Amino acid sequence: MDFYEVIQARRSARKFATTIVESDKLKRIWTAVQAAPSACNLQPWKFLVLRSPESHEKIRKVFHGWVTEAPLVIVALGNRQAAWRRDGESIHAVDVAIAMEHFVLAATKEGLGTCWVCAFDRRALSTALNLAPEWDPVAVTPLGYSTDPSPMSVHKNYTEFVEER
Ligand SMILES: Cc1cc2nc3c(=O)[nH]c(=O)nc-3n(C[C@H](O)[C@H](O)[C@H](O)COP(=O)(O)O)c2cc1C
């Protein structure tokens, strides 16, 4: 798959096989995340890889089920104190979102399914994972081989959101 094929192949997966994710694939994905840009190159992120049944169990209630059915759950954290600030406001969520999308696209290239998940109680997740207060759980994705048969979502045509001036 070339870059544009990867972009077109990505979709949100919400059903997964129990098949284990190969470690060489995971390493290539992390190398892609490593290359992500960030404000002032501060890279204010950390990614938790939840693999064990115990770790899945800890967060099951926060996600009401399906996310924790994937063999791996990735939790993308941003550091509120370490990130660049604009108008006094930490930009960590932007940095983490870019790194996370590197993750998602690299996973697609590796034939793996992901789904951005932001609809969770951040406080409950922080408590469940015993996170230090500076680490904000920005987004989560399950990772595994997708068995989700859902058709591709309808996306706006770019002519609807591109405006030349
Ligand atoms: C920032 C963000 C948050 C999202 N949060 C959730 C979520 O909490 N639960 C979920 O099932 N999907 C979530 N999604 C996935 C979107 O629903 C999905 O990307 C959108 O419907 C388009 O479908 P596609 O990804 O298959 O193209 C989220 C996506 C983004 C980018």
Image (cartoon, rainbow, N blue to C red):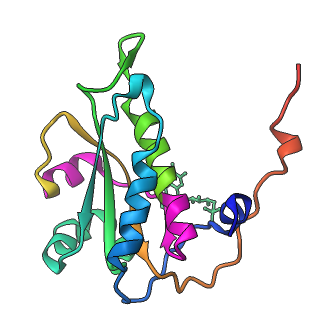
Q: x%, y% of residue 157?
A: 85, 50
* Image: magenta residue range: 104-128
Question: Where does residue 108 sit, x and y in percent of width and height?
Answer: 56, 68
Numbered-mark total: 0
* Ligand 1's quadrant: bottom right
- Residue 84, can we see it? yes
> In this orientation, which residue lies closer to the viewer: 127 or 97?
97
- In the image, is residue 75 part of the stretch drawn in magenta? no
Q: 125 or 5, which is in the foreground?
A: 5
* Residue 159 relative to residue 21: left or right: right
Q: Residue at x 56, y 82 (%)?
A: 148
- 161 relative to 51 in the view: left or right: right
Q: Is residue 150 above or below residue 82?
A: below
Vertical position of residue 60 compared to residue 120: above or below: below
| 107 relative to 23, above or below | above
Q: Is residue 118 magenta-colored?
A: yes
Q: Is residue 43 above or below residue 27?
A: above
